[in-house]
Image (tube, grey):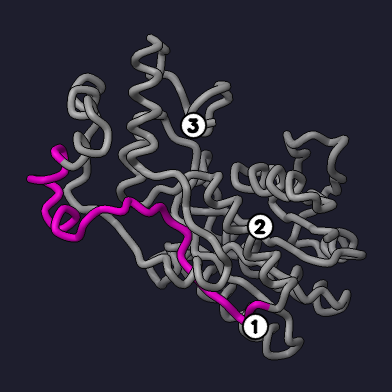
Amino acid sequence: MKVLVTGASGNGGQAVCQRLLQAGHQVRMADVMPSKVNGKAAEFVRCDTRTVSDVQQAVRGMDGVIHLAAWHCAHQPPVSDDTIFAVNVDGTYNVLEACRKEGVRSIVYASSMAYGWWSVYGVSKVIGEDLCRAYHEMTGASIAMLRYHEFIPRPYLEFGARLLRNGVDRRDVASATVMALEAAAAKAFGLFRTIIHTNHEMPEHVRADFTQLGLEWCEQQVPGSSQLIEKYGIELPKDIEQHDLSEANRVLGWKPQIGFTDFLRDLKLRNEQGLEIHDLVVPSELPNGLT
């Protein structure tokens, strides 16, 4: 497929573009700044999704569109609510309208677990999903709305603990996104929404009483992990967030691959090798482990 990725220069966009290229798709990267993805392997176009002509040029000739471009509340440095709304709402309208005019029928929309009425960002995702529903009804396009958990770059140790709550590895974000696009192209659904999160495969009784049972569970999964958790001062959360991801598996064939136990195994390996991890930020560029 010829695939457009908006927001291609972001953390998730880079991972999605790499995954698309590995799967053999032709990729057009669209963003306001160049992507770090190998420019020889993919085309880049400058695109501000608030500008109709930019979006029309970017969508032209594409078979599928992955719309990731958005501002979020946690962005550093902060951006205004006006900017968040304009990019997330007007930009989404412009992308879907360009898809309608170009006859694009395979679309993935980056929604969020922050969907809701608690902030301008959350409301922008409510409106974005409503726009997707409207365009599906108007055009018959297959549209996947993926409610991602957080994959903002974090310090390595913080990232590990966050996987137990609202964090997800960007490799899982990328695989889910590409599989959603391919399922849309195969007309596996009309309008589809799912959560993109990690899967801890944790028994419910452990999840429900993680404060008391969590450390023992970690030790059972990865021997020696309790000592590592103490050594590196990892603060385990009291409440574990876990979701039923069976619908994503049934419709997309997707399962997350990176969870907290994978982080513990990676931490154990780095510790045994004497690697410095305190200044490490995930996603890292190290050759092994959580790259």
Q: With respect to residue 60, does 154 lie above or below?
A: above
Position of residue 18 in the picture relative to residue 231 (left or right): right
Question: Alpha-carbon distance for marks 2 and 1?
Answer: 17 Å
Q: Name the residue that disc number 2 marks.
A: 178
Residue depicted at x 53% and y 60%: 254
Residue interval drawn in magenta:
188-216
Q: Name the residue that disc number 3 marks.
A: 290
Of residue 162 and residue 117, the one placed in the foreground of this image is: 162
- Mark 1 packing: few (<14 Cα in 10 Å), some, or many (20+)? some
Q: Secondary structure at mark 1?
A: loop
- The quadrant of the rendering that contains the C terminus is top right
Residue lying at the far bottom of the rendered structure? 137
203 falls in the magenta region: yes
Q: Name the residue that disc number 1 marks.
A: 190
Residue lying at the far left of the rendered structure? 212
Q: Earlier in the sequence, mark 2 or mark 1?
A: 2
Residue depicted at x 73% and y 34%: 36
Which amino acid type is marked by label 3? Leu
**Image quadrant where residue 18 sits:** top right
Which amino acid type is marked by label 2? Val
- Mark 2 packing: few (<14 Cα in 10 Å), some, or many (20+)? many
Which amino acid type is marked by label 1? Gly
Question: Alpha-carbon distance for marks 2 and 3?
Answer: 20 Å
- The quadrant of the rendering that contains the N terminus is bottom right
Q: With respect to residue 74, does 254 lie above or below?
A: below
Q: Earlier in the sequence, mark 2 or mark 3?
A: 2
Q: Secondary structure at mark 2?
A: helix
Residue depicted at x 71% and y 70%: 107
Q: Position of residue 195 (x, y in %)?
A: 46, 65
**Image quadrant where residue 88 sits:** bottom right
Note whether residue 74 is visible.
no
**Image quadrant where residue 113 sits:** bottom left
